[in-house]
Image (cartoon, rainbow, N blue to C red):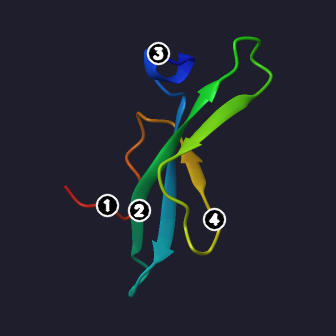
Amino acid sequence: MTEETKNNPSHVAYQVRDGAADKSYWTRVGAAFPHGDGKGFNVVVDAMPLDGRITLREPSEKPEGTEG
């Protein structure tokens, strides 16, 4: 078991696509885990956005532009 699978991520990685009428579409693509010394992160991605842009947000925050 890796360190990432034992701990909760500090941030969630999203691909954000612009939509019509100022709406954004957020797709979870991975997560970020802090290093033990607090000086960096390991970023684990399950998919890579075609535009190369990844947005990191704290997990407790609801991404903008989502419904529900």
Instruction: Please name the amino acid that badge 3 sits on.
Output: Met
**Nearest to the observer: residue 42 or residue 54:** 42
**Crowd rating for badge 4 (residues with CA inside 10 Å; few <14, some 14–19, many 20+):** few
- Which residue in the protein does label 3 denote? 1
Identity of the residue furthest to the left in this view: 68
Question: Does dot 3 land on a helix, a strand or a loop?
Answer: loop
CA–CA distance in space, label 2 to label 4: 12 Å
Identify the mark nearer the N-term, 3 or 4: 3
- Which residue in the protein does label 2 denote? 26
Question: Does dot 2 land on a helix, a strand or a loop?
Answer: strand
Q: Which numbered dot is residue 53?
A: 4
Q: Residue at x 63, y 65 (%)?
A: 53
Question: Does dot 1 land on a helix, a strand or a loop?
Answer: loop
Q: Position of residue 63 (x, y in %)?
A: 41, 53
CA–CA distance in space, label 2 to label 3: 29 Å
CA–CA distance in space, label 4 to label 1: 18 Å
Identify the mark nearer the N-term, 4 or 1: 4
Question: Does dot 4 land on a helix, a strand or a loop?
Answer: loop
Instruction: Please name the amino acid that badge 1 sits on.
Output: Thr
Identify the mark nearer the N-term, 2 or 3: 3
In contact (CB < 8 Å): disc 3 and disc 1: no
- Which residue in the protein does label 1 denote? 66
Identity of the residue furthest to the right in this view: 39
Nearer mark to the viewer, of 4 and 1 = 4
